[in-house]
Image (cartoon, helix red, strand yellow):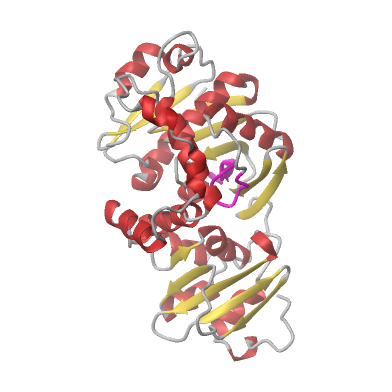
Amino acid sequence: MRASPGARTADAPGVLRELLDRFDPHVIDLPGGRARIRLVVTDGESWDVLLRGPHAWLEPPAEGQQPDALLSADTATWESVGRDIRGGMDAFRRGRLKVRSSLHLGVGFLAATSGVTDPGRLRFERVDTPMGRVATMQAGTGDPLIAIHGLGGTKASFLTTVAALADSHRVIAMDLPGFGESDKPIAAPYDAAWFATAITRLLDELGIDRAHLAGNSMGGRVAIEVGLKAPERTERIVLLSPALAWLRDRRWSGLVRALRPELGLLQVAPRPVVESVIRRLIPGAEEGWVAAGVDEFLRAYLTPRGRAAFYAAARNIYLDEPHGDDGFWSRLARLSPQAMFVWGRQDGLVPISFMKHVERTLPAARHVELDCGHVPQLERPQQTHAAIREFLAAE
C-alpha cells in the first residue's frame, strides 16, 4: 500500500489496515484511474478506501459522498478476512460479506487485497482491442475458457464459474462490448456476428489461438456464432440456457424492426421509476447474488450508451431469423465444435422444450437437465460446474 499524505489510515481499525497492507494495484482495474470503495462494518464504523492509481488509503465516509462500490460485513467477518488472505472471496461466496453497486470494483478490491501472488490469481483488467476496450475477470493457468454473459448481464454472472474451474483452466469472463465496464460504441450493430468478432479480437490480443467457450442466454447465442464463424479458434462449447431463434410466429417483428435502438440514448422514465420497476419484477432483487446482478444491470442501463446497447442487442435476439439458408436453425446444423447444452426445467425465457429441436438439428450435442431457471451457473453452481468439468475433460 502507498498511503496518501494526510490520510486518516492510521486511525482506521487494524483489520482494515491489514487489508490495505496487502493491496496490489496490478490486480484491480480502475475505470478513470480512481475509485471510492466503502467498507461497512455492520456492527461498528464504516470507512472509505480511496484508490488513486497505485495509491490507496482509508478515511471516514464524507457526508453525501456516494461510493463506487460497497462491501459490508460484521466485525467477526472482517477480522476473519483480515487474518486469512483468501478470506474475502470465501466470505463473499458464502454470503457473509455483501458487495453492492459495482462488482467490478468491489470484487476487484477483494482480489487486490487477498495477498495471493501466484500467476493464476483472480485479477481484473481491460484489454485494448480493435473493437474497443474489453473488460475481463480471469483466474487460473490451464486451457483457456471464455465465459460470455447474457443480455443485461456482466462478467460478474460467471464469478462462480471462475472460482470453480480456475484450478484446471484459465477462465476469462468478459464484459461484451456495450455491457459492464467494456466500451459501448453507439453505432455498433450489437448482433451475434459482431459480438463473435469481438471475441476473436479479444483472443488475438490475449495471444490465445483456441479456447473453450461457455455462454449463458445471449452469451450462448454468441458462443454458437463464434463456433460457426471461427471453428478454427473454438474448442468445445458449453451453452447454458442459450438464446435460440424463435420458431413460433413473431407477431411484433414489424414494429421491432421499425424501432431504432438509438432511442435508448434518451431516458424516458426517471431513474427511481426504472429502479423500482426492475426490483419489483425480479424475485429476490434485494438479496445476495440477485441483488448484485440487478445493481450491475442498472449501472449500465441507466447510462445512455448502456441503454442503446441493451435495446440493440434485445432487438437482434427477437429478430434472429430462424429459417432459410442463412437462418439460425439451418446454420446450427453446420456447427462443428463439440457442444453441450445445459437446460433449466424452470426456465421461463428459454423453455426446455427447445431441447427436442436442438436434438433434431444437432444430434451429436450433449444435453444436461437441471432443476433451475435461466442462469444455471448461479442457481445450481455445483451441478453445472461438475457437468462442465466432465465435458471439457472428456476424450
Q: Quadrant of residue 9?
A: bottom right
Query: Residue shown at 53%/83% (left/top)?
Result: 61
- Which residues, given as a range, are shown in magenta? 163-184
Above or below residue 10? Residue 367 is above
Task: Tell me if I can see residue 381 in this picture.
Answer: yes
Q: Is residue 180 magenta?
A: yes
- State the residue in front, 285 or 120: 285
Spot occupied by residue 122 in the image (x, y as percentages of width and height): 60, 54
Query: Residue shown at 38%/45% (left/top)?
Result: 382
User: In this view, which residue lies farthest toward the bottom?
Assistant: 11
Spot occupied by residue 210 in the image (x, y as percentages of width and height): 65, 28
Above or below residue 55? Residue 255 is above
Asked whether, in this view, residue 309 is left or right of residue 277, the answer is right
Above or below residue 303? Residue 352 is above
Task: Tell me if I can see residue 154 in this picture.
Answer: no
Q: Is residue 115 magenta?
A: no
Asked whether, in this view, residue 244 is left or right of residue 9, the answer is left
Query: Residue shown at 67%/50% (left/top)?
Result: 126
Spot occupied by residue 151 in the image (x, y as percentages of width and height): 45, 41
Above or below residue 321? Residue 145 is below
Query: Residue shown at 64%/44% (left/top)?
Result: 141
Asked whether, in this view, residue 86 is left or right of residue 24, the answer is left
- State the residue in front, 37 or 195: 195
Asked whether, in this view, residue 366 is left or right of residue 161, the answer is left
